[in-house]
Image (cartoon, helix red, strand yellow):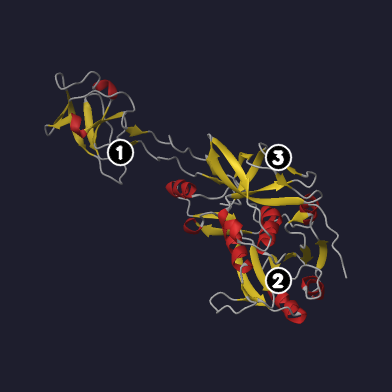
């Protein structure tokens, strides 16, 4: 029987990154489909925003010095030279002693430098009484005051948010270049595993890992192309693996990664010509992990127990292939926790606010259990060189959401 030759989490990350093709494929997508995609080419504005001096109120465009000191008791009388139109260029100019009606969002005439709100004016036909003075640039937005021509709007590597989409739309950007999503295929193995929706018989369990991995992949903005559920049969697993690698950059095989007589993942990878370069992690839970490369694809033999598989995904797959960085907070440990020297230990934790402090409490569980993932707020790790962590110690918590 084979035994694991475990390596540390850091060694595993280094080995995978050594074999990783750093060049990512790029595609162009419409702005309507760009939300949460990662920008592959910086975007700069090709216009000023606004592209003209515009009014923020309904009222009259004026020269500010014309109306200085105006009030209801001492109004200023200006000549009305006409009305500006929304959505049209305003080629008019005003001189001293003149004004022009402009609607909200309309273009100011040349020579004007302020707007007086309509409620502070009285239209007398050919003349307008201004009952309130304004300062220069009142109630207007100057051309280019928000965005200048060639201002950088999105940097390479940024994830596009709804705010980005609003700004890009405002300067007329209809398409952006983004990195293609990493494609995943998931294979769940086990004679006892059945699909959701079927009646559960004694000895059977529902397929947890396919759906848990799918959710993690989609949270990390990857794409699941195919999923398979196969029995513990080497030939079937090998054929399924050949199908899975055709449409994915990364294949996750759930279960069968240990060294028991019915653990076929290692042999199936070798059957299709895959190169196994990791078999065993100094990670608890998550020790029986396989990592292999087939051509330019990666294959992960994930532990079958839900918490173990999710641990490995968060520790290896998520940061390397999805570039996902989980939110971290710090809190004070509410009780002692024992580790396992030589292994990095992941512990699910619950957060509580007590005496205006964040306290962190461990949720002890077995790797086969799924409920602690729901009850917990996040997880902490005990380094492989520590026997444990002490009550009162400041710890880093990686949040689940």
Which residue does the numbered mark 3 point to in the structure image? 390
Residues under numbered marks 1 and 3 in contact, where contact means CB atoms less than 8 Å apart: no
On the picture, is 104 further left or further right than 120? right
Q: What element carries label 1?
A: loop
Lower position in the chain sequence, tag 1 or tag 3: 1
In the image, residue 142 lies at what x, y percent? 38, 33
Residues under numbered marks 1 and 2 in contact, where contact means CB atoms less than 8 Å apart: no
Q: Is mark 3 on a helix, strand or loop?
A: loop
Compute the Cα span from label 1 to label 3: 74 Å
Task: Classify residue 55 by image quadrant.
Answer: top left
On the picture, is 370 further left or further right than 71? right
Q: Residue 176 carries which label?
A: none
In the image, residue 253 lies at what x, y percent? 70, 69
Residue farthest along the front direction in this orientation? 335
Residue farthest along the left direction in this orientation? 124
Residue beneath the point at 35% across and 36% down: 53
Compute the Cα span from label 3 to label 2: 45 Å
Pair 1/2: label in front: 2
Which residue does the numbered mark 1 point to in the structure image? 91
Assess disc 1: are there few (<14), some (14-19) or many (≥20) residues with their C-alpha within 10 Å of its C-alpha. few
Give the camera-side residue of 399 and 107: 399
Task: Classify residue 259 by image quadrant.
Answer: bottom right
Residue beneath the point at 18% across and 29% down: 79
The image shows a total of numbered marks equal to 3
Which residue does the numbered mark 2 point to in the structure image? 245
Picture quarter with the N terminus: bottom right
Q: Is mark 2 on a helix, strand or loop?
A: helix
Assess disc 2: are there few (<14), some (14-19) or many (≥20) residues with their C-alpha within 10 Å of its C-alpha. many
Pair 1/3: label in front: 3
Lower position in the chain sequence, tag 3 or tag 2: 2
Residue 331, above or below 79? below
Pair 3/2: label in front: 3
């Amino acid at each position: 029987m084979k035994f694991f030759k475990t390596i540390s989490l850091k060694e595993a990350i280094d080995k995978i990154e050594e074999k990783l093709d750093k060049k990512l494929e790029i595609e162009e997508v419409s702005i309507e489909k760009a939300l949460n995609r990662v920008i592959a080419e910086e975007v700069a504005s090709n216009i000023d925003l606004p592209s003209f001096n515009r009014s923020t109120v309904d009222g009259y465009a004026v020269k500010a010095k014309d109306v200085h000191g105006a009030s209801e008791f001492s109004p200023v009388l200006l000549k009305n030279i006409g009305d500006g139109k929304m959505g049209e260029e305003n080629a008019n100019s005003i001189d001293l002693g003149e004004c022009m009606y402009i609607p909200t969002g309309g273009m100011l005439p040349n020579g004007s430098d302020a707007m007086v709100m309509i409620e502070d004016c009285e239209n007398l036909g050919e003349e307008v009484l201004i009952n309130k003075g304004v300062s220069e640039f009142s109630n207007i937005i100057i051309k280019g005051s928000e965005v200048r021509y060639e201002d950088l709007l999105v940097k390479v590597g940024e994830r596009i948010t709804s705010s980005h989409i609003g700004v890009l739309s405002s300067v007329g950007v209809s398409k952006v270049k983004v990195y293609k999503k990493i494609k995943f295929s998931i294979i769940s193995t086990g004679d006892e595993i059945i699909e959701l929706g079927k009646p559960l018989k004694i000895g059977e369990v529902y397929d947890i890992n396919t759906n848990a991995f799918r959710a993690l992949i989609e949270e990390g903005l990857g794409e699941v192309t195919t999923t398979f559920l196969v029995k513990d049969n080497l030939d079937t697993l090998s054929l399924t693996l050949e199908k899975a690698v055709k449409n994915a950059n990364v294949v996750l095989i759930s279960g069968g990664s240990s060294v028991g007589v019915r653990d076929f993942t290692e042999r199936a990878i070798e059957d299709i010509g895959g190169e196994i370069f990791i078999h065993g992690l100094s990670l608890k839970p998550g020790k029986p992990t396989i990592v292999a490369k087939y051509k330019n694809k990666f294959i992960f033999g994930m532990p079958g127990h839900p918490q173990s598989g999710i641990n490995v995904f968060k520790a290896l797959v998520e940061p390397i292939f999805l570039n996902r960085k989980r939110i971290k907070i710090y809190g004070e440990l509410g009780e002692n926790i024992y580790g396992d020297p030589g292994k990095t230990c992941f512990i699910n934790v619950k957060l509580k606010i007590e005496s205006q402090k964040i306290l962190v409490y461990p949720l002890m569980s077995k790797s086969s259990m799924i409920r602690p993932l729901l009850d917990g707020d996040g997880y902490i790790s005990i380094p492989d060189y520590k026997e444990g962590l002490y009550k009162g110690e400041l710890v880093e918590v990686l949040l689940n959401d």
